[in-house]
């Protein structure tokens, strides 16, 4: 099970820290939907309208507060 620490940066932006590979991805709510800086979203899912696990995590975990830890 992977652990993620999701931190709210501002009203529409979140940092998602992946504990297993020590990467930080930025998830943003933009006018036409959500975006993520992870390679899976950037190179694949953005073209199909899909959502990566980082976007799903932010949307579903209650990260609307300041910080939350999520295990996927």
Image (cartoon, rainbow, N blue to C red):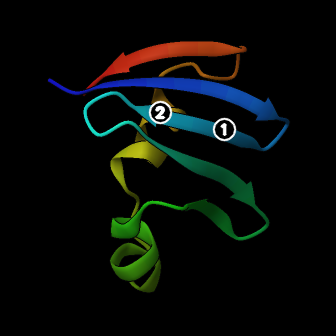
Q: Secondary structure at mark 2?
A: strand
Residue 45 lies, in percent from the top left, at 37, 74
User: Badge 1 is on which residue?
Assistant: 14
Numbered mark located on residue 57 in the image: none
Observer-nearest of 35 and 33: 35
Tell me the mark number nearer the camera, choosing from 2 and 1.
2
What residue is shown at x 63% (from left), y 14% (from top)?
67
Compute the Cα span from label 2 to label 1: 10 Å
Q: Position of residue 17 (x, y in %)?
A: 47, 33
**Residue under the image location 79 percent in, 44 percent down:** 12
Q: Of helix, strand and loop, which one carries label 1?
A: strand
Q: As drawn, is 11 to the left or to the right of 53? A: right
* Residue 49 in the image, given as x and y percentages of width and height: 45, 75
Image position of 58 with respect to 33: above or below: above
Screen quadrant of the C terminus: top left
Per the rendering, the mark at residue 17 is: 2
Q: Are marks 2 and 1 in contact (CB under 8 Å)?
A: no
Residue located 45% across and 14% down the image: 69
Q: Residue at x 61, y 59 (%)?
A: 34
Position of the N terminus by quadrant: top left
- From the viewer's perspective, tell me whether residue 52 is left or right of residue 12: left
Dot 2, how many residues are within 10 Å of its Cα: few (below 14), some (14-19), or many (20+)?
some
Q: Position of residue 39 (x, y in %)?
A: 38, 68
């Amino acid at each position: 099970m992977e652990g993620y620490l999701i931190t709210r940066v501002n009203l529409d932006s979140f940092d998602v820290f992946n504990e297993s590979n020590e990467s930080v991805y930025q998830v943003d709510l933009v006018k036409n939907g959500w975006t993520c800086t992870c390679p899976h979203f950037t190179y694949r899912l953005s073209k199909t309208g899909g959502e990566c696990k980082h976007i799903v995590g932010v949307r579903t975990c209650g990260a609307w507060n300041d910080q939350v830890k999520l295990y996927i």
